[in-house]
Structures are given as structure tokens and as C-alpha cells.
Image (cartoon, rainbow, N blue to C red):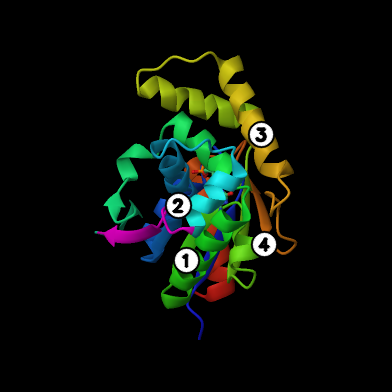
Amino acid sequence: MKPLTIAIDGPSGAGKSTVADVVCQKLNILHLDTGAMYRAVGLCALEMGIDPYDEAAVSRMCEEGKALVDVKYQDGKQITLLNGRDVSPLIRTQEVGGAASAVSRYVPVRTMLVKRQQEMAAAQPMLLDGRDIGTVVLPDATVKIFLTASAEERARRRMLQLQEKGTFTPFEEVLAEVNARDLQDTTRDLTPLRQAEDAILVDGTNITFDETVEIILKLVEEKYGK
Ligand code: DC
């Protein structure tokens, strides 16, 4: 029997990663945050002084094996490696997020990362979250979820997160960033963010975090009998 695979796709700020972590704890399976892998490539470009919007230079960087991304797990927690170095603490900035969104549009980047994601999911039960999991990475995933929330709600949550870190950013500014990222992720030529035909839409705008987790666990149980 194929290992259990759960695909969660959706726009940035929908809470995919936090929801995925709890679902994985409950099911005792690993969580692969694929966005972290794109962020590692974005960071690599920034560190090498390469403009993330320079398609030729970013492609060359990947093809020459200068941006080797891998993932390992420590006590069930994902550690993202760039050329063998743990870059997990460096990839959560706005700057790296923007670079990730830019480099994720290029064929060599996607080919390299999708291959690694498929290898990992074939080896063990896993939940993958990203933008193209249900459509490209795991078209035969056991359960496919498209987790979203309104742009305003995602901006509100992001603003609170920033506040917790001691940064006050006006709502309008955060909302503009959310809308800009959505536009970039949904309009790129190569595998833009979209809901797979057989994915189940979960709209988290008016439900709590716990309710979202419950809905997903129930869907997994229905499909996989766990
Ligand atoms: O989920 P995130 O914000 O960490 O992702 C960073 C960027 O990577 C996001 O703007 C789009 C891209 N991405 C992608 O193209 N495909 C994925 N499977 C995951 C992320």
C-alpha cells in the first residue's frame, strides 16, 4: 500500500504550516513545508548577490549545483538545509519570502525541488504543504485540501504575528503585501497556485484554528480510516 500522503495547498498566510504541524502531531507523520525549500533557494540567491528576478542567473545557480536544498528531521521538526547548512532560522524574513516567490517561477528551481519532494513522500507517510502539491507534486495524494481565508483575514493574522514580534505595520500595508504575493503566486506562468479539481476547499475565514484541524483530521479519517 502506498504511504499516506496529505496535500495542503493555499495562498500565503492561510495558516497551512501551523495547521499542518498539529495535524501531523495527531497522526504521527512528518510535515514537509515545501515553501521552506523555495525560501532556501531565494536565500541562496540573495547570499550569492544574485537578483532573484534574474531568471538566467538563478537558473544557472541551480543547474551548476550551487543551491542544493534538502530537508532533515530532528525530533520530528523540519530542518531546512542549503548546501548542507541549516538555514531554518534565516528563511522567515519578508525579504527571503519575496525572493522565494520570485525564484519559484523558474523551471530549474521547480524541477529540482519537486523531484526531492516526490522522493521524500514516496518513502514515508507525509503531509506536504505548498502551492502545487495537489496539482503537480502529488497528483495521487490520499487527501487533498485547499486551505484558504479572505485576504483581509490573512492580513489581520499576519499583522498580529508581526506585532507579537514587536513590529507594528499598518493593516493597509500588510494587506497590500498579501495581495501582491497572491497576484505573483496565482499569475505566474509555471504551475500557478490553483485548487486541484479533486481538492476539498476549507475556508478558514470564519472558523477557528481547532475547527480547521478537526475538519482536516475528519477528511483523512474518511479517506484513510485512521
Ligand atoms: O509558503 P511560503 O510563504 O513559505 O512560500 C514561499 C514562496 O514559495 C511562495 O511565495 C510561493 C513559493 N512556493 C511555491 O511556488 N510552491 C510551493 N510548493 C511552495 C512555495
- Decide whether residue 80 is among the magenta residues: no
Residue shown at 48% from the left, 62% from the top = 127
Point out the tag, 2 or 4, that comes first from the N-terminus: 2
Image side of residue 85 versus residue 29, left or right: left
The reply to whether the residue tagged 4 has its Cβ within 8 angstroms of ligand 1 is no
- Tell me the residue that label 4 is attached to: 135
Q: Tell me, for residue 116, which label it has, or none.
A: 1
Q: Say few, some or many: other residues with alpha carbon within 10 Å of mark 4 (under 14 / 14 to 19 / 20 or more).
A: many
Q: Residue at x 46, y 44 (%)?
A: 39
Which residue position is annotated with label 3?
Answer: 150
Q: Quadrant of residue 90?
A: top left
SS type, badge 3: loop
Q: Which region shows up in magenta?
A: 64-74
Marks 4 and 1: which is nearer the front?
Answer: 1
Q: Answer with mark 2 or mark 1, whichever residue precedes in sequence.
A: 2
Q: Which mark is residue 37?
A: 2
- At which x and y percent is residue 142? 58, 71
Say if mark 2 contacts mark 3, CB within 8 Å: no
Q: CA distance from mark 2 to mark 4?
A: 18 Å
Looking at the picture, tell me which residue is in the foreground, 131 or 152.
131
